[in-house]
Structures are given as C-alpha cells and as structure tokens.
Image (tube, rainbow, N blue to C red):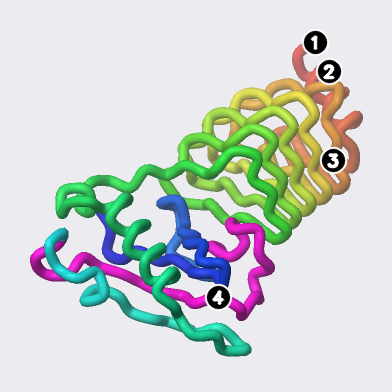
Amino acid sequence: MCNRHSFIVTRAGKVHHGFGITDSHTTIRELAGLDHTDSGTYAFEWQPPAGWPDADFNNGLTQDTAPIPHWGLKAKHLKAVETHLRRRYPTPDAWNAPEVMELPKNLKMTGYLDLRGTGITSLPDNLTVGGYLDLRGTGITSLPDNLTVGGWLDLRGTGITSLPDNLTVGGWLDLSDTGITSLPDNLTVGGSLYLDIGCFDTAVGARIALISKKV
C-alpha cells in the first residue's frame, strides 16, 4: 500500500519513479540515470483524489520542486503524468495493494544505491552502481552475475550463501553474518574483506583462511 507516489518529470516528457523501493526524488534521479543533484526536472508526489479513477488526477498532485532554469509544464508533460498514474494505479485496489519492488534490467547508476531495510528480494543482471550498495536487512538471497559496485558493498545479515561470478567491488566488502563459506576465484575487491572469521586485506587472503578453516 502506498502513502504517496513520488516521481520526476523531465523536459523531454519522461516520467521516472522509484520502482516501489524509494520515495526519494534524489534516488529516483539516480535510478533514471541522472545525477542526483540534477535540478532540471519537476519533482512531484501524488495520492489518488476522492472518486479515483473518475476524478481529475491533478486533484491529488503536489509539486515539490520546479526545474532550474525554469521551464513550464506543457500538455505533453501533463498527459505523460496522467498516463503513468493511470497505468500504475488504475483503481483504488491497485493503490492499496503491496508495492512490487523490482529494479529495471541493465541498470547503471552513477551514485550510490541504498536498499537497506526495503522489501526488495532480487537485483537485475548486469547491475552497475558507481557508489556504494547497501543491502543490509533485505530479503536478498543471491546476487546477479556481473555485478559491479564502485564503492563498498554491505551484505551483513542477508540470506546470501554464495557470490556470483565476476563480482567487482571497488571498496570494502562486508560478508559478516551471512552464509558465505567460500569465495569465487574471479572475485575482485579493492578494499578490505570482512568475514565472520576476521578482516582481510585481500580476497586471496580471505579465501585461504576459509579453505584452512575447512581443513
């Protein structure tokens, strides 16, 4: 069930939202492939007005911010907003139903992605995150192949039991309080690697320690 639906509108008439995982306009900009500081979009929040879907969608619309430099909303922008809202929430029952939390395929973000405590249970293949990726407290049980994280990756307390092929982490990787008992040969970690058995400066050292623990 939604309390509000946050989204942004670009000058080209594109509507971007948070895929059920965030109401932050800053994060929505990142998910849309824009810089989180981008001020060239309108930011809105919406709730279904009384009488929805027969009511005017504008009656539930609240503008948070306007673009700088300013450009005015035209008919095509308002039509795009109405189309988006009516497709996503065609009835009050659709509004009251649990949000489906799913990121788009082949997502590439320049900044961080903070998903801790959300209800997300899977990540798309070929996900690239330029900053950190925080998955603490999520229902994630596996990571997609070819996941690339430019900053740190925090998996503490997740149900993950193995790492995918070609995982690349630019910063530190925290696997504490997970079911990880081995590491893939092609794992790349730029910083420290944290396991329940200790902290290691390299993935090679951590892999040796895990193997020794089994012997």
**Mark 2: few, some, or many residues within 10 Å (few <14, many ≥20)?**
few
Which one is nearer the viewer's eye here, 173 or 130? 130
Mark 2 lies on a secondary structure that is: helix
The kind of residue on which mark 4 rests is Thr
> Based on the displayed image, in which of its 4 quarters is residue 63 positioned?
bottom left
> Based on the displayed image, in which of its 4 quarters is residue 62 positioned?
bottom left
Q: Which residue is mark 4?
A: 41
Picture layout, residue 175 above or below residue 96: above
The count of marks equals 4
Magenta stretch bounds: 27-52
Is 193 included in the stretch rendered in magenta? no
Q: What is the distance, in whole Å, between disc 2 and disc 4 at their CAs? A: 54 Å
Q: x%, y% of residue 207?
A: 84, 25
Tag on residue 100?
none
The kind of residue on which mark 1 rests is Val
Q: Which residue is mark 2?
A: 212
Which one is nearer the viewer's eye here, 119 or 162? 119
Picture layout, residue 68 above or below residue 204: below
Q: What is the distance, in whole Å, between disc 3 and disc 2 at their CAs? A: 20 Å
The kind of residue on which mark 3 rests is Val
Q: Nearer the viewer, mark 3 or mark 4?
A: 4
Q: Is residue 99 left or right of residue 40?
A: left
Q: Are marks 4 and 1 in contact (CB under 8 Å)?
A: no
Q: What is the distance, in whole Å, between disc 1 and disc 2 at their CAs? A: 5 Å
Q: What is the distance, in whole Å, between disc 3 and disc 1 at their CAs? A: 25 Å
Q: Are marks 1 and 2 in contact (CB under 8 Å)?
A: yes
